[in-house]
Image: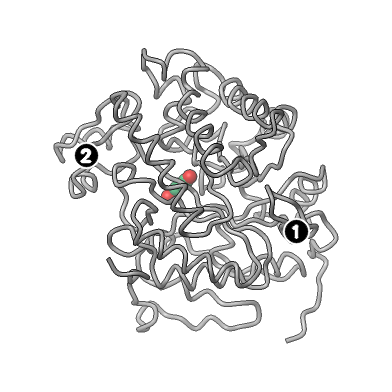
Amino acid sequence: MSIVKTKYSLEDTNLFKSIRLGTKELKNRAVFAPSTRSRSAPGDVPSDLMLKYYEDRSKDNGGLIITEGTFVSKEASGYSGAPGIYTLQQAKAWKLITDKIHKHGTFVSCQLWNLGRAADPFELKERGVPYVAPSVVYPNEDAEIAARKSGVELQALTLKQIEEFKKAYIEAAKYAINVSNFDYVEIHSAHGYFLDQFLEPSTNHRTDKYGGSIENRARLVLEIIDSLIKEIGADKIGIRVSPWAEFGGMKGENESIHPIVGIGYLLSELQQRANKGNELAYISIVEPRVNAGFTIPLENLKDYKQLKSNLWIYQIWRGNIIRAGAYLTDREDNYQLIRNDVNANNRTLIAFSRYYTSNPDLVKRLKYGLELTPYDRPTFYTHTNYHYGDWTFYGQENKSKPEDEESKKLPVALVSA
Ligand code: PHB
């Protein structure tokens, strides 16, 4: 089929210029943002459905795919359907996926995930692991009720448990780079998950070296990064932060210490490491227009243009920045937001999640300005192949129906135990 470029084409922007991340040269700056889609097989093993899903999104691309949140250990889990990278079986299954992605000249980062207080206590009970966080502060009342009912109540981490989690990050990253052949690992330090729970004062009441001051609250994530720099090299590491997000019971700008101060310190420390020759491949930031996967209604954002912005990050961190959050909601303005942000300098990448789910060839559609297929949020976190592996490429009709055999398929482990 011959493709006709439309007025929405972004081909002339920096989005379609190459960029170096660490030692790799990406062909474009359009990134698949990390997106939980719950299609891993039992035992947190990457599945056949995931293989096709990631391969489809790597075709005709050449940019960067960041995986969905991937557990660094069984103790970091507590959510069904998300994959892990804490056993050799899981790492070998991921290798089959990265091989397909690399075959198409596309790059891939493994997002290293740990839930902390965001875990489901019933799921933890089934897995026989404790429910832990920096301090005993539940994300909301429902979580507290679920914890009481399940008998698995939230406990403050001991120093020994913190040491074990540090090791888990290192082991998972070594699996990711040395066994699964990922190009990068990304430390998930956003959205109210484990490491973010350390960063913010409302979720961290510790009185040891991991709590109290800004330096102490950022200590764990920096210790993990420093160990990873030694083990795999700074050029293979990314980190994600979400200064504004009020997701998962976090307070965002209503924290007692504004997140710009705390996250600013963390980024300043990372820049110090860069100045000494250990520059991370990228920093990934979430825009204030979204709360994780949800666009904040415009009427709640009246003051957004004046007040909330991530531009301060550019002044502290001098390296590559991946920005994500509702960049595709308004096409009629000719994708002006993408144009402005990606063209503002030579170190910005833009990441997309929701429309990347329903448009496997999103990068090509943006290049030529082609119509986007709307996404279907109710199927984001279901477990069958319906509205997961069945999204079609531009110009192909999507005929799949929930009752089709192909749609009803459940994930099967790519590598057996
Ligand atoms: C989600 O599963 O909705 C989710 C996971 C990770 C995030 C944000 C949202 O960072």
Q: Which residue is rendered at x = 57% and y = 53% of the image?
A: 33
Q: Which mark is residue 146?
A: 2
The residue at the far right in this view is 12
User: Mark 2 to mark 1: distance in Å?
Assistant: 44 Å
The amino acid type of the residue labelled 1 equals: Glu
Q: Quadrant of the C terminus?
A: bottom left
For disc 1, the marked residue is: 332
Q: Nearer the viewer, residue 202 or 335?
A: 202
* Mark 2 neighbour density, 10 Å: few (under 14) some (14–19) many (20 or more): some
The residue at the far bottom in this view is 1
Judging from the image, what secondary structure is the residue with disc 2 in?
helix
Q: Quadrant of the N terminus?
A: bottom right
**Which color scheme does this rendered protein use?**
one colour
Left or right relative to 113: residue 391: right
Left or right relative to 90: residue 218: right
User: Residue 321, percent across and down?
Assistant: 68, 42
